[in-house]
Image (spheres, helix red, strand yellow):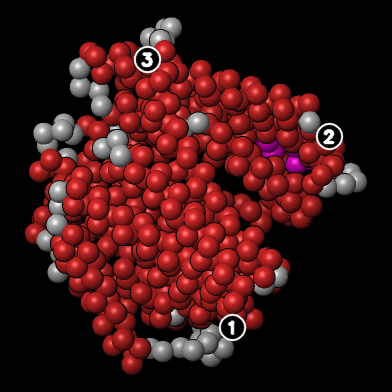
Amino acid sequence: MIRGVIKNIGWLTIFQFALLALNFFLLPYYVKMVGIDGYGIYSLINRFLDYVILFQMGVAPTIVYFVSHLKSDVDEENARAIVAVGLSIQILAGCIIGLFFYFFRSEISCFFTSGDSVGKLMDGLIVGSLNLLVIMVTEVFFSILKGLNYFSIYSFLIFMRSLMSSVLILIFLYNGYDVVYMFVARLISASLVMVLSVLVVYYYARCLLRLGWFKFREVKCFFDFASWVVCSRFCRVFIASFPTVIVGRFVGVEGVGVYSIITQLMGVINSVLGNALQVFFPLVGKLSRNDNTVRNKIYMLANEVVSILTTPVFVLLVVYAGVVLEMWVGREVAGVGADPLRIMVVAYYLSSLTIIPSNFMLGTNNVKLLALVNIVQCFVMAAFVSFLVSRFGLMGGAVGIVVVEAVFVLSIVYFNRRIMVCDNVQFFLFDRVKYLGVCVLLSALALYWYNPLSLHEESILSFLIAISLVGGVQLVVSVLLSSKVIKDELIKIVRR
């Protein structure tokens, strides 16, 4: 089982980095071919659709949860009904969103832009809404694959969709088509992947595609779980976007720019980590309620592995925050953003503590607890971040986000003790503080060997080599101090 978890995490991580690399290298070509205004229209529509997709009503996590609990004919019947409900909701929501964009495309376009860009934005919204409908339907079949633990196929299909759309976009733009055809390309690739995902699900779990009429009981069961998921997700959106608004109100546009750069840098780390570790959500559902020993063992091992992998990165970011920002965006931003970045690293380190518990809360049907914790975080965010930003600017905002993440960490103490029935001392002290102390000590020793205050007299290559060596030493020492199970699994992987 542990080997299967490592395999799934590996596939998700590989394809996640492949997606990041693909987008990173193609972005300059997009900007060059359609211009900064054209790419602005493309980005604006994408961002608008990203927020609209929140109205999926928690369909994907609900399907993953019920499909992962397939153990008998009764579970199969429930899962089939849940899939039918979810697919109906996705189609209905997608059609409503599409009609909304169609009838109000002129008003939306005129609100966001003017001049020649209005027509392109109107056409882009219509094609983008069709693309959104296809993606929402595809998400049902992706959720089935995740619930069945086929993360390698799921991540491959996600990557293929992006790769096909990128190739088609380049072909359209090379032949002189405008920005609207970027969405046409995405619609074509999304439709092809949707068909492919249906065929894959039919091959592996055709029983779930024998859809029929569902009863009120299935609808109620669906919304009992999905409603709390929706609540939790809206809270997370508020937590992510509220600081930007407050910083803009009290610090100004320059502060928003610096804050956005910091969150983008940290967001890359957390997005890769969060996507890779989503394998634990359906895994918990596959364990019977009598398998508490196995479940708790996996829970503690996952926490320890996340600590080993993330602690060196976060500690090095604290030590070399100024140099990293200078290398990425220049000395001016580094001078303003280095100290807030160091405090934000603390917040994101606390956030990394919550990734495994969040997945296990979903998998053990404690989604209400997850939503309630997120609601409390929203109130703390509204109170503390507003006050601290108004008094201390960006530094105050960073401290406020640390407080918000600390609220979730406190809830983990309750979750560990009452639901997982595992040792908080082991979870926090031996699986977290131990590796944090080791990495801090090694980083302090490394500062005597290499302590660049600026890249003015250093090459980027020498800096990257130096921090890679330090991080590598930290990782090796952490692995040597890890539990016997982790060492044994690593030895097996190396031998194979």
Question: Above or below — where is 28 with respect to 82?
Answer: below
* Discs 1, 2 touching: Cβ within 8 Å: no
Q: What's the mark number on residue 217?
A: 3
Look at the numbered discs 2 and 3 and tell me whether their residues touch, using CB distance below 8 Å.
no
Q: Position of residue 234 (x, y in %)?
A: 52, 44
| Helix, strand or loop for disc 1 | helix
Q: Nearer the viewer, residue 341 or 420?
A: 420
Asked if 392 appears above or below 41 in the picture, the reply is below
* Residue 351, percent from left and from top: 38, 59
Q: Nearer the viewer, mark 2 or mark 3?
A: 3
Instruction: Find the magenta span and give its range.
Output: 178-185
Residue lying farthest bottom? Answer: 448
Q: Determine the CA span between mark 1 and mark 2.
A: 43 Å
- As drawn, is 9 to the left or to the right of 101? left
Mark 1 = which residue? 335
Q: Quadrant of residue 176?
A: top right
Which of discs 3 and 1 lies nearer the camera? The answer is 3
Q: Amino acid at mark 1?
A: Gly
| Residue drawn at the location 28% of the way across and 58% of the way down | 306
Q: Residues within 10 Å of mark 2 (few under 14, many from 20)?
A: some
Query: Gap in Å between the C-alphas at discs 2 and 3?
Result: 41 Å
In the picture of the structure, the residue carrying the numbered disc 2 is 106
Per the picture, the main secondary structure of the magenta-coloured stretch is: helix
Q: Is residue 350 above or below residue 27?
A: below
In this view, 151 is above or below 471: above
Query: At 36% across and 45% down in the image, what residue appears?
Result: 370
Which residue appears at 61% of the width and 31% of the height?
132
Residue drawn at the location 49% of the way across and 49% of the way down: 236
Distance, label 3 to label 1, CA atoms, is 59 Å
Crowd tier of the residue under label 3, counting other residues whose Cα lies within 10 Å: few below 14, some 14–19, many 20 or above: few
